[in-house]
Amino acid sequence: MTMTDRLEKTLSKPGKLLSIYFTAGYPAVEDTVPIIKKLEEAGADMVEIGLPFSDPLADGPVIQESSTHALRNGMTTRKLFDQIRDIRQQVSLPLVIMGYFNPILQFGVEAFCAACAESGIDGLILPDLPLDVYERDYKEIMEAHGLSVIFLITPQTSDERIRQIDSASTSFIYMVSSASTTGVQSEFGKGRDAYFKRIADLDLKHPQLVGFGISDAASFQRATTYAKGAIIGSGFIRMLTEKGTGGIEAYIKGIL
Amino acid sequence: MSKYQVDANGFYGEFGGAFIPEMLYPNIEELRQEYRQILSSESFQQEYQQLLRDYVGRPTPLYFASRLSEHYGARIYLKREDLCHTGAHKVNNTVGQILLARHLGKSRIIAETGAGQHGVATATVCALMGMPCIVYMGEVDIARQAPNVARMKMLGAEVRPARSGSRTLKDATNEAIRDWINNPEDTHYIIGSVVGPHPYPDLVARLQAIISEEIKEQLLAAEGTEDPDVLVACVGGGSNAAGTYYHYLDREHVEIIAAEAAGLGVDTGESAATSALGKMGIIHASKTLLMQTDDGQITEPYSISAGLDYPGVGPLHAHLFKSGRAKFVPVTDAEAMEAGQELARLEGIIPAIETAHGFAVLKKGHIAKDSLAVINLSGRGDKDLQTYMDYFKLSE
């Protein structure tokens, strides 16, 4: 199965999708693969593997700390690729790498994409690689390796730009729930509903997954009223910090 | 167009750009579309020029340093940015940016600070305009720059400690950017140097360009020529240097020297000499030279001077380095401290330790005999008294 197929097949499943973000190398450096396997067993639909970075600008304290911790554990980009080399013999759900651009630039963009393709990574979320730079400098390389690049939209993104992002997308759109860094616990109030509805009414070509501020069954329900699915990051990492990898099954079942 | 000016995509050669998360796109785009127009508008210029004159105290003198000149056998002029209100060039930028923020309809100001000079300059203009001001400062810097923390608080600013990462300037900048992501509508972020996403490096350079504009006029009056043989400034992020070089960038016969902080020495692992130790990468949304591991993690620099203690450098300066337009001279802590003391004793001026790095190029032999030199005296040393006291054991 090609990578795009894997994402496409998941995105066209009936029902709402749950995607989980975690930071590679946290809590322990060798937890990466066990976490992915447990997430699939517990029923998550997709996994975002966070590449730890020293200066994660768009992240709140929880993901910052998990990154710092992972780096202190000795996590590196090379080590991640070593860990996930055989991942496709173990899981079949779509895998997306989420990472800031500098470590990828140092690894070499071409080499990074090749390593992703070899490990069976399906897509990339690169929060500090803007759309125009992507299209000008990197689209060709990333597409050549079959990687679907996923872009973010926020409540401040204009309709015109959302349409532009929709047409540059090849799998789904990452819909940031509020103007915030990750992990900010906020009410899914009326303003949020209006934003979700505005996006739903745009009738975009690609489905949306909502992220930021989702951590439990209630916020998952609320977020997926208008969207195809939702992404949990900080909430999952908080659970890992408290309960370790043994808590994964109960956590996922508690949401779905 | 000048090859040293920013291009339409926000790059200086291969450096610069705006590697921002989508959350910042509307703010950066608004700024990008409007900053040039606002800066050149009559209403902005009128207010800006008036504040620079009556509030900041411009033009600052271009002072002929006769004893220093005699000592080194050159004709050396000092651009006295240390005489600006708040004690350094930083206020040129904050005065301009607070007016810009008002033009953009913003009501809340955030800033980052390392040594505290930019934080004080921002708190000052916020008090002047009656706007709320939040300054992010690394926890480590808060502890070692207590007088400037007190000044900011006296001026009514809220100083928020940056507790992430290494808890210094780089982390304070991260926290300010995160604040902006969380407050996208009412807030303007006043960056203190020629760093960050486009258009900030160009915006800050334009607001500091008043330094070289005045040097041209003043040198013409004093020496009958606008052009010195050599211009010297210290570079951390590089705002005073950008201002000093700005109007001379295309006059290739004017030599440009950038003094960067070598800390304990370029090869000691305790250094902030970005041109020597940095590799191309992305820091604070700008592609530039930066100090990092092979894995692309940003490392913590070291310098005795908190204002030069930055792992990157503005993209303009990375371009000036790479193109060979500027000569970068690494200056150690010891060389800078000695130069600071020498200036105090020869001219009766105690410079900021950042500024003292620029003066160290004299002793290192980079200013030819009989040449006409202008050194930017970017800030005064009051804030560094404790460091000078400890270093020279002045309280014994």
Image: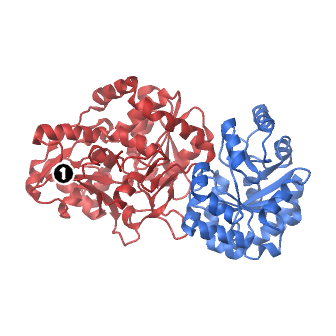
Chain colours: A blue, B red
Position above or below: A139 against A201: below
Horizontal side of residue B147 vs B351, given as left or right: right
Residue ID at (46%, 44%): B8
- Given residues B166 and B49, the one toward you in this image is B49
The location of residue B191, given as percent across then percent down, is 45, 43
Residue ID at (7%, 54%): B70
Position above or below: A109 against B128: below
Identify the amino acid type marked 1.
Ala
- Given residues B62 and B163, the one toward you in this image is B62
Q: Quadrant of the N terminus of chain B?
A: top left
Q: How many marks?
A: 1
Horizontal side of residue B247 vs B122, given as left or right: left
- Can residue B168 be spotted in the picture? no
Q: Quadrant of the C terminus of chain B?
A: bottom left
Horizontal side of residue B295 vs B248, given as left or right: right
- Can residue A187 be spotted in the picture? yes
Residue ID at (35%, 69%): B266
The location of residue B346, given as percent across then percent down, is 13, 52
Residue at mark 1: B344
Splitting the image into 4 quarters, where does residue A139 fall? bottom right
